[in-house]
Image (cartoon, rainbow, N blue to C red):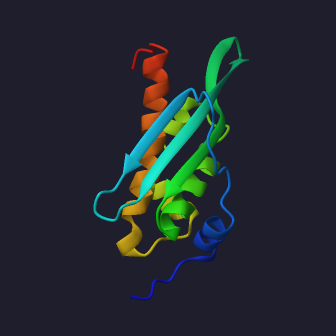
Amino acid sequence: MTLNYSKKVMENFLHPRNMGKIENADGVGKVGNSVCGDILNLYIKVGKKKIRGKLIEYIKDIKFQTLGCGAAIAVSSMITQLAKGKTLEEAEKISNKDIVHELEGLPPVKYHCSLLGADALHLAIKDYLSKNKHEK
């Protein structure tokens, strides 16, 4: 089967951004797809700043380690770009559809990879919030 990938997918696969591991990460999201075998570990560091007198938590740094196909790597790269610098509240709203849109599409057979990216981000945020006893 021949898959047609967008230039954006190929760029993020061949030159992924934010690849690696954050030691002592504030939050970690680990997801996998048992059908295709893709595994994604996403690490976040949370920063805090005051805006108009209110303390805001944001994703100061984000990195990933992915074992998977080209689409899974491109998705991992893109989710880090979408989330970096966003408040936790903004990052929680990033969906797999946002990832697919930013990558200018994915072949239907690879759409499940976008779910891995969104799920890993949401789990990393949830992990951070639970470690820091935030009410949700």
Quadrant of image for the C terminus:
top left
Indicate whether 115 appears above or below 63: below
Q: Is residue 109 left or right of residue 9?
A: left
Which residue occupies 71% across, 16% down?
Answer: 50
For the N terminus, the quadrant is bottom left
Q: In the rendered view, would you say 135 is above or below 124?
A: above
Q: Position of residue 51 (x, y in %)?
A: 71, 19
In this rendering, does residue 95 appear at all? Answer: no
- Where residue 104 sits, quadrant-wise, is bottom right
**Can residue 41 be seen at all in this image of the molecule?**
yes
Residue depicted at x 58% and y 70%: 9
- Residue plotted at (39% across, 66% down): 111
Residue 35 image position (x, y, % from top left) = 28, 63
Give residue 132's position: percent from left, percent from top: 49, 15
Q: Position of residue 37 (x, y in %)?
A: 36, 61
Q: Nearer the viewer, residue 40 or 75?
A: 40
